[in-house]
Image: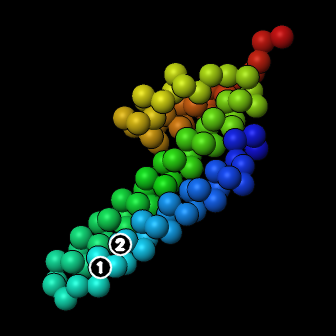
Amino acid sequence: MYVWSKRLLFGLLAGFVLVLGLFLAEGAGSEVSVLKMHTIRWITLNYVGLVIWVFVWMIDQTRVRGKNVWVWLIPFIVAPLPTLVWLVLFLQRRMKT
């Protein structure tokens, strides 16, 4: 893949570990609601990470096929799953020669 580099990978991993450490430090309380808030933050962190990973994959796939990914950015932010499905269908069309 063209987009992934060691520098990008280690940067994303370091950011994830930093945020994870922050969540774990805040989640060590004795209140009942702390676990619920911690769980919501954990799910949100995973979802955002997944969305970023999928968009980077979209960048890679469109670059390989010579298409422009940036026209897909706004629809992807609004509705990630349907946009991903339409992009895959768009990329699978036969190329005109």
Q: Camera-side residue: 97 or 64?
A: 64
- Disc 2 packing (10 Å; few <14; some 14–19; many ≥20): some
Q: Camera-side residue: 28 or 51?
A: 28
Residue at 56% from the left image edge and 56% from the top image edge: 12
Among the 4 quarters of the image, the one containing residue 32: bottom left
Q: Amino acid at mark 1?
A: Gly
Q: Is 7 on the left-hand or right-hand side of 46?
A: right
Q: Say above or below: 79 vs 50.
A: above
Q: Say above or below: 20 vs 79.
A: below
Marks 2 & 1, CB-CB < 8 Å contact: yes
Residue 27 numbered tag: 1
Q: Amino acid at mark 2?
A: Phe
The x, y position of residue 82, in whole percent, is 46, 37
Quadrant containing the C terminus is: top right
Q: Is 21 on the left-hand or right-hand side of 60?
A: left
Among the 4 quarters of the image, the one containing residue 36: bottom left
Location of mark 2 (residue):
23
- Disc 1 packing (10 Å; few <14; some 14–19; many ≥20): some
Q: Secondary structure at mark 2?
A: helix
* Labels in figure, total: 2
Residue at 72% from the left image edge and 49% from the top image edge: 5
The x, y position of residue 27, in whole percent, is 29, 79
Residue at 31% from the left image edge and 72% from the top image edge: 39
The x, y position of residue 28, in whole percent, is 29, 85
Q: Say above or below: 77 vs 26.
A: above
Residue 49 numbered tag: none
Q: Secondary structure at mark 1?
A: loop
